[in-house]
Image: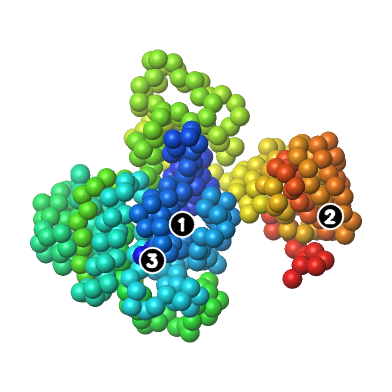
Amino acid sequence: MNIVLLSGGSGKRLWPLSNDIRSKQFIKIFKNLDGSYESMVQRVYRQIKNMDADAVITIATSKTQVSAIHNQLGEEVGISVEPCRRDTFPAIALAASYLHDVKGIQEHEAIVVCPVDPYVNEDYFQAVQELSHQAETGQANLVLMGIEPTYPSEKYGYIIPTDNQSFSKVETFKEKPDRKTAETYIRQGALWNSGVFAFQLKYLLDKSHELMDYVNYQDLFERYESLPRISFDYAVAEKEKNIQAMRFQGQWKDLGTWNTLSEAMEEPAIGKVIMDESCENVHVVNEMDVPVLAMGLKDIVIGASSEGILISDKAQSSFIKPYVDSISQQIMFAEKSWGLYKVIDVAEDALTVKITLNPGEQMNYHSHKNRDEVWVVINGTGRTIVEGAERRVKSGDVILMQAEDRHTIMADSVLTLIEIQLGAEISTQDKQKFKLEGEE
């Protein structure tokens, strides 16, 4: 089975746990039997592999998420990297070209496209397999998974099938209606559009070449920034006449808001949290190293991270986005290919960051034009290279880098350090990368 997982999003609806670099699918909130936590992307990836150990999984994502994906799923997972965000049709077209031109997937094979962040059980992936098998038959150009609606939602699109069979021809799509219209659609037997669909690879490649001028995967990748922003639904699905829909009646939740996220949490609190007995229907996720105390609250969500603190009525939390849009600040945490980066203090002409490197990892060899840096090693052991000079470092060591000095650090064990950036123009853009001697 070939599956493309769409991993996008800006992470604003689950602020402050997510940001432009760490979207909601990377937040670890699902508790495992051993007491550890896994994220949405880890949960979905595990569920697919439990269903089909040989499944070819490709994650279509922006370059800002690549490090988080490798950190959570390992280096072997297939990734189709979008140079910039261009909505779902360009992303799927790029992934299809990647599968054909880079991975060697044959044109007659079925591809299933799924969001990376639904909260589902194993029966969902059994349905995904059925969807793939149906696409292989070639009876329809597109096969969609429709969800049996549980209420007249205004935030989902609706699929209206011609009958109530398990696989039905699709009569029409209706995008995000008002509540009264949604009630009418449901009486007509409509299904929620889950964003899951399957096709034979040749179909999507032909559609992509029809709608976009490119030669192959590399050419499409290089032209990607010039492509129009358009969703798959608008570009392809709404214009396609030969579509089938499969009904799915199992558990399916779109964890797009704090309210729906809290419904999927197996415990009311994650992190350092204290709640008194008078709290009712309260959920707290605390990623900070200080305790959160909640007393006498009802129907509330609390989220705390280095990005900020949210305290909201659960129903009201769905309307968070415009308020988060108005917040302009430095990204306060990120997963890097080598470990974790967390800002702990922002001052005029200075930025203080806590950095954790994983064993065997290293930063790029780089320099900064407009700032000096100081590293203070907190724990662990490793090596630094500053202007070509290598030095072994351990807890308590201090390393100084002037502006323009080329430098890197390598971890032998888990290595934690404080980085102090000093300069009048501190910017993430102020970085030039170099190759170390001996690197290809």
* Element assignment for label 1: loop
Q: Residue lying furthest front in this view?
A: 53
Depicted 391 relative to depicted 397: above or below: below
In the rendering, which numbered label is found on residue 8? 1
In the rendering, which numbered label is found on residue 27? none
Measure the C-alpha gap from mark 3 to mark 1. 19 Å
Q: Residue at x 16, y 67 (%)?
A: 169
Quadrant holding the C terminus:
bottom right
* Element assignment for label 3: strand
**Residue 206, percent from left and from top:** 36, 81
- Crowding at mark 3 (Cα within 10 Å: few <14, some 14-19, many 20+): many
Q: Residue at x 80, y 67 (%)?
A: 438
Depicted 145 relative to depicted 110: above or below: above
* Element assignment for label 2: strand
Q: Confirm whether residue 230 shows in the render.
A: no
In the rendering, which numbered label is found on residue 385? 2
Quadrant holding the N terminus:
bottom left
Q: Nearer the viewer, residue 17 or 378?
A: 378
Q: Nearer the viewer, residue 58 or 15?
A: 58
Q: Give the residue pinned by disc 3.
A: 2
Q: Amino acid at mark 3?
A: Asn
Residue 8 as seen in the image, left or right of residue 132 = right
Q: Amino acid at mark 2?
A: Ile
